[in-house]
């Protein structure tokens, strides 16, 4: 009996240590993601959002192909179409998000982009708490889109397109995950996106020769915003529940606002901070309820 109790305690200790490690990795990945976006924005004056996104996609594809080693020749037609679609959506999401960051700032752009996963979560439920979450998020959007002296409707529109792309990316990712083993599908999709941005990036870099500093910022964005979060998420999801992971993801708008403040000196008014808090709360409640629903089905 004593041996069994000691073994159980030791196992609980290992689980607790693993969860703590997973949380630390998630925190580092989230900070890396938003820091990478802010560092990439420093290169906008030289190569623009399209140039930064192109370099980011190339770096991400190169690293993921080296780490995952997908086998594209083994994919069937049923596997290829969602991979290609996910790669196109992924590229569009990053391009519209970075273009929005260039116009309305990192914090507001990422906050609006998070409406995408929130919409996916709320679309599958008709319960009153989810309706409250939807109203809360809608009120936050109204605050973010309020008239102001420096209003940029195009920037807001680009961020909302990024949100729609993220919603589509989530749905496509599920399809790819069911049809392609492991993470080969995600790596292949990154390769598709890199190929799509090859002519775009070459055109941008040819017509506006970049500085080494701008290229360094773009490469750093690829490593910090794509490679580190991707590998970190894979590591963390083996140590924390999907519900907790989704709950933690909801703090990304806050991280983005802080990164924009520190790195880019993009300050926000208190109504904007309140709107960010509302979106974070709606995402957190939605992620928690989604996790409970999945636990109940199991």
Image (cartoon, rainbow, N blue to C red):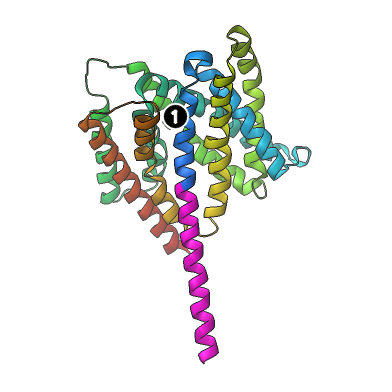
How many tags in the picture?
A: 1
The question of residue 12 being in magenta is answered with yes
Reading the image, the residue beneath label 1 is 38
What residue span does the magenta drawing correspond to? 1-27
Q: Nearer the viewer, residue 38 or 118?
A: 38
Residue 188, percent from left and from top? 67, 37
Residue 208, percent from left and from top? 58, 9
What residue do we see at 32% from left, 16% from top?
Answer: 152
Q: Nearer the viewer, residue 102 or 76?
A: 102
Majority secondary structure in the magenta region: helix
Residue farthest bottom in this picture: 1
The image quarter containing residue 210 is top right
Is residue 234 found left or right of 246 in the rendered image? Answer: right
Residue farthest right in this picture: 73
* On screen, residue 199 above or below 285: above
Is residue 130 found left or right of 187 in the rendered image? Answer: left
Residue 209, percent from left and from top? 60, 10
Is residue 142 found left or right of 38 in the rendered image? Answer: left
What residue do we see at 60% from left, 24% from top?
Answer: 55
The image quarter containing residue 269 is top left
What residue do we see at 38% from left, 45% from top?
Answer: 250
Categorize mark 1 by other alpha carbons within 10 Å: few (<14), some (14-19), many (20+): many
What residue do we see at 38% from left, 41% from top?
Answer: 118
């Amino acid at each position: 009996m004593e041996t069994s109790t000691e073994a159980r305690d030791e196992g609980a200790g290992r689980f607790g240590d693993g969860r703590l490690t997973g949380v630390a990795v998630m925190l580092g990945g989230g900070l890396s993601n938003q820091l990478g976006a802010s560092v990439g924005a420093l290169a906008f004056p030289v190569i623009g959002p399209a140039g930064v996104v192109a370099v980011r996609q190339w770096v991400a594809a190169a690293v993921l192909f080296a780490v995952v080693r997908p086998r594209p020749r083994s994919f069937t037609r049923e596997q290829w179409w969602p991979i290609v679609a996910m790669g196109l959506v992924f590229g569009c999401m990053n391009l519209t998000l970075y273009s929005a960051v260039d116009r309305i700032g990192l914090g507001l752009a990422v906050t609006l982009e998070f409406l995408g996963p929130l919409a996916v979560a709320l679309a599958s439920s008709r319960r009153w708490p989810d309706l409250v979450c939807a109203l809360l998020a809608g009120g936050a959007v109204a605050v973010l889109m309020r008239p102001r002296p420096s209003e940029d409707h195009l920037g807001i529109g680009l961020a909302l397109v990024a949100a729609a792309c993220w919603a589509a990316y989530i749905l496509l990712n599920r399809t790819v995950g069911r049809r392609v083993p492991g993470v080969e599908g995600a790596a292949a999709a990154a390769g598709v996106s890199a190929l799509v941005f090859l002519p775009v990036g070459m055109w941008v870099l040819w017509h506006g020769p970049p500085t080494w500093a701008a290229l360094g910022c773009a490469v750093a964005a690829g490593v910090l915003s794509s490679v580190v979060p991707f590998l970190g998420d894979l590591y963390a999801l083996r140590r924390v529940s999907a519900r907790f992971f989704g709950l933690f993801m909801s703090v990304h708008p806050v991280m983005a606002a802080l990164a924009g403040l520190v790195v880019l000196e993009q300050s926000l008014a208190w109504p904007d901070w309140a709107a960010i808090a509302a979106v974070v709360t709606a995402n957190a409640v939605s992620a928690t309820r989604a996790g409970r629903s999945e636990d109940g089905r199991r």
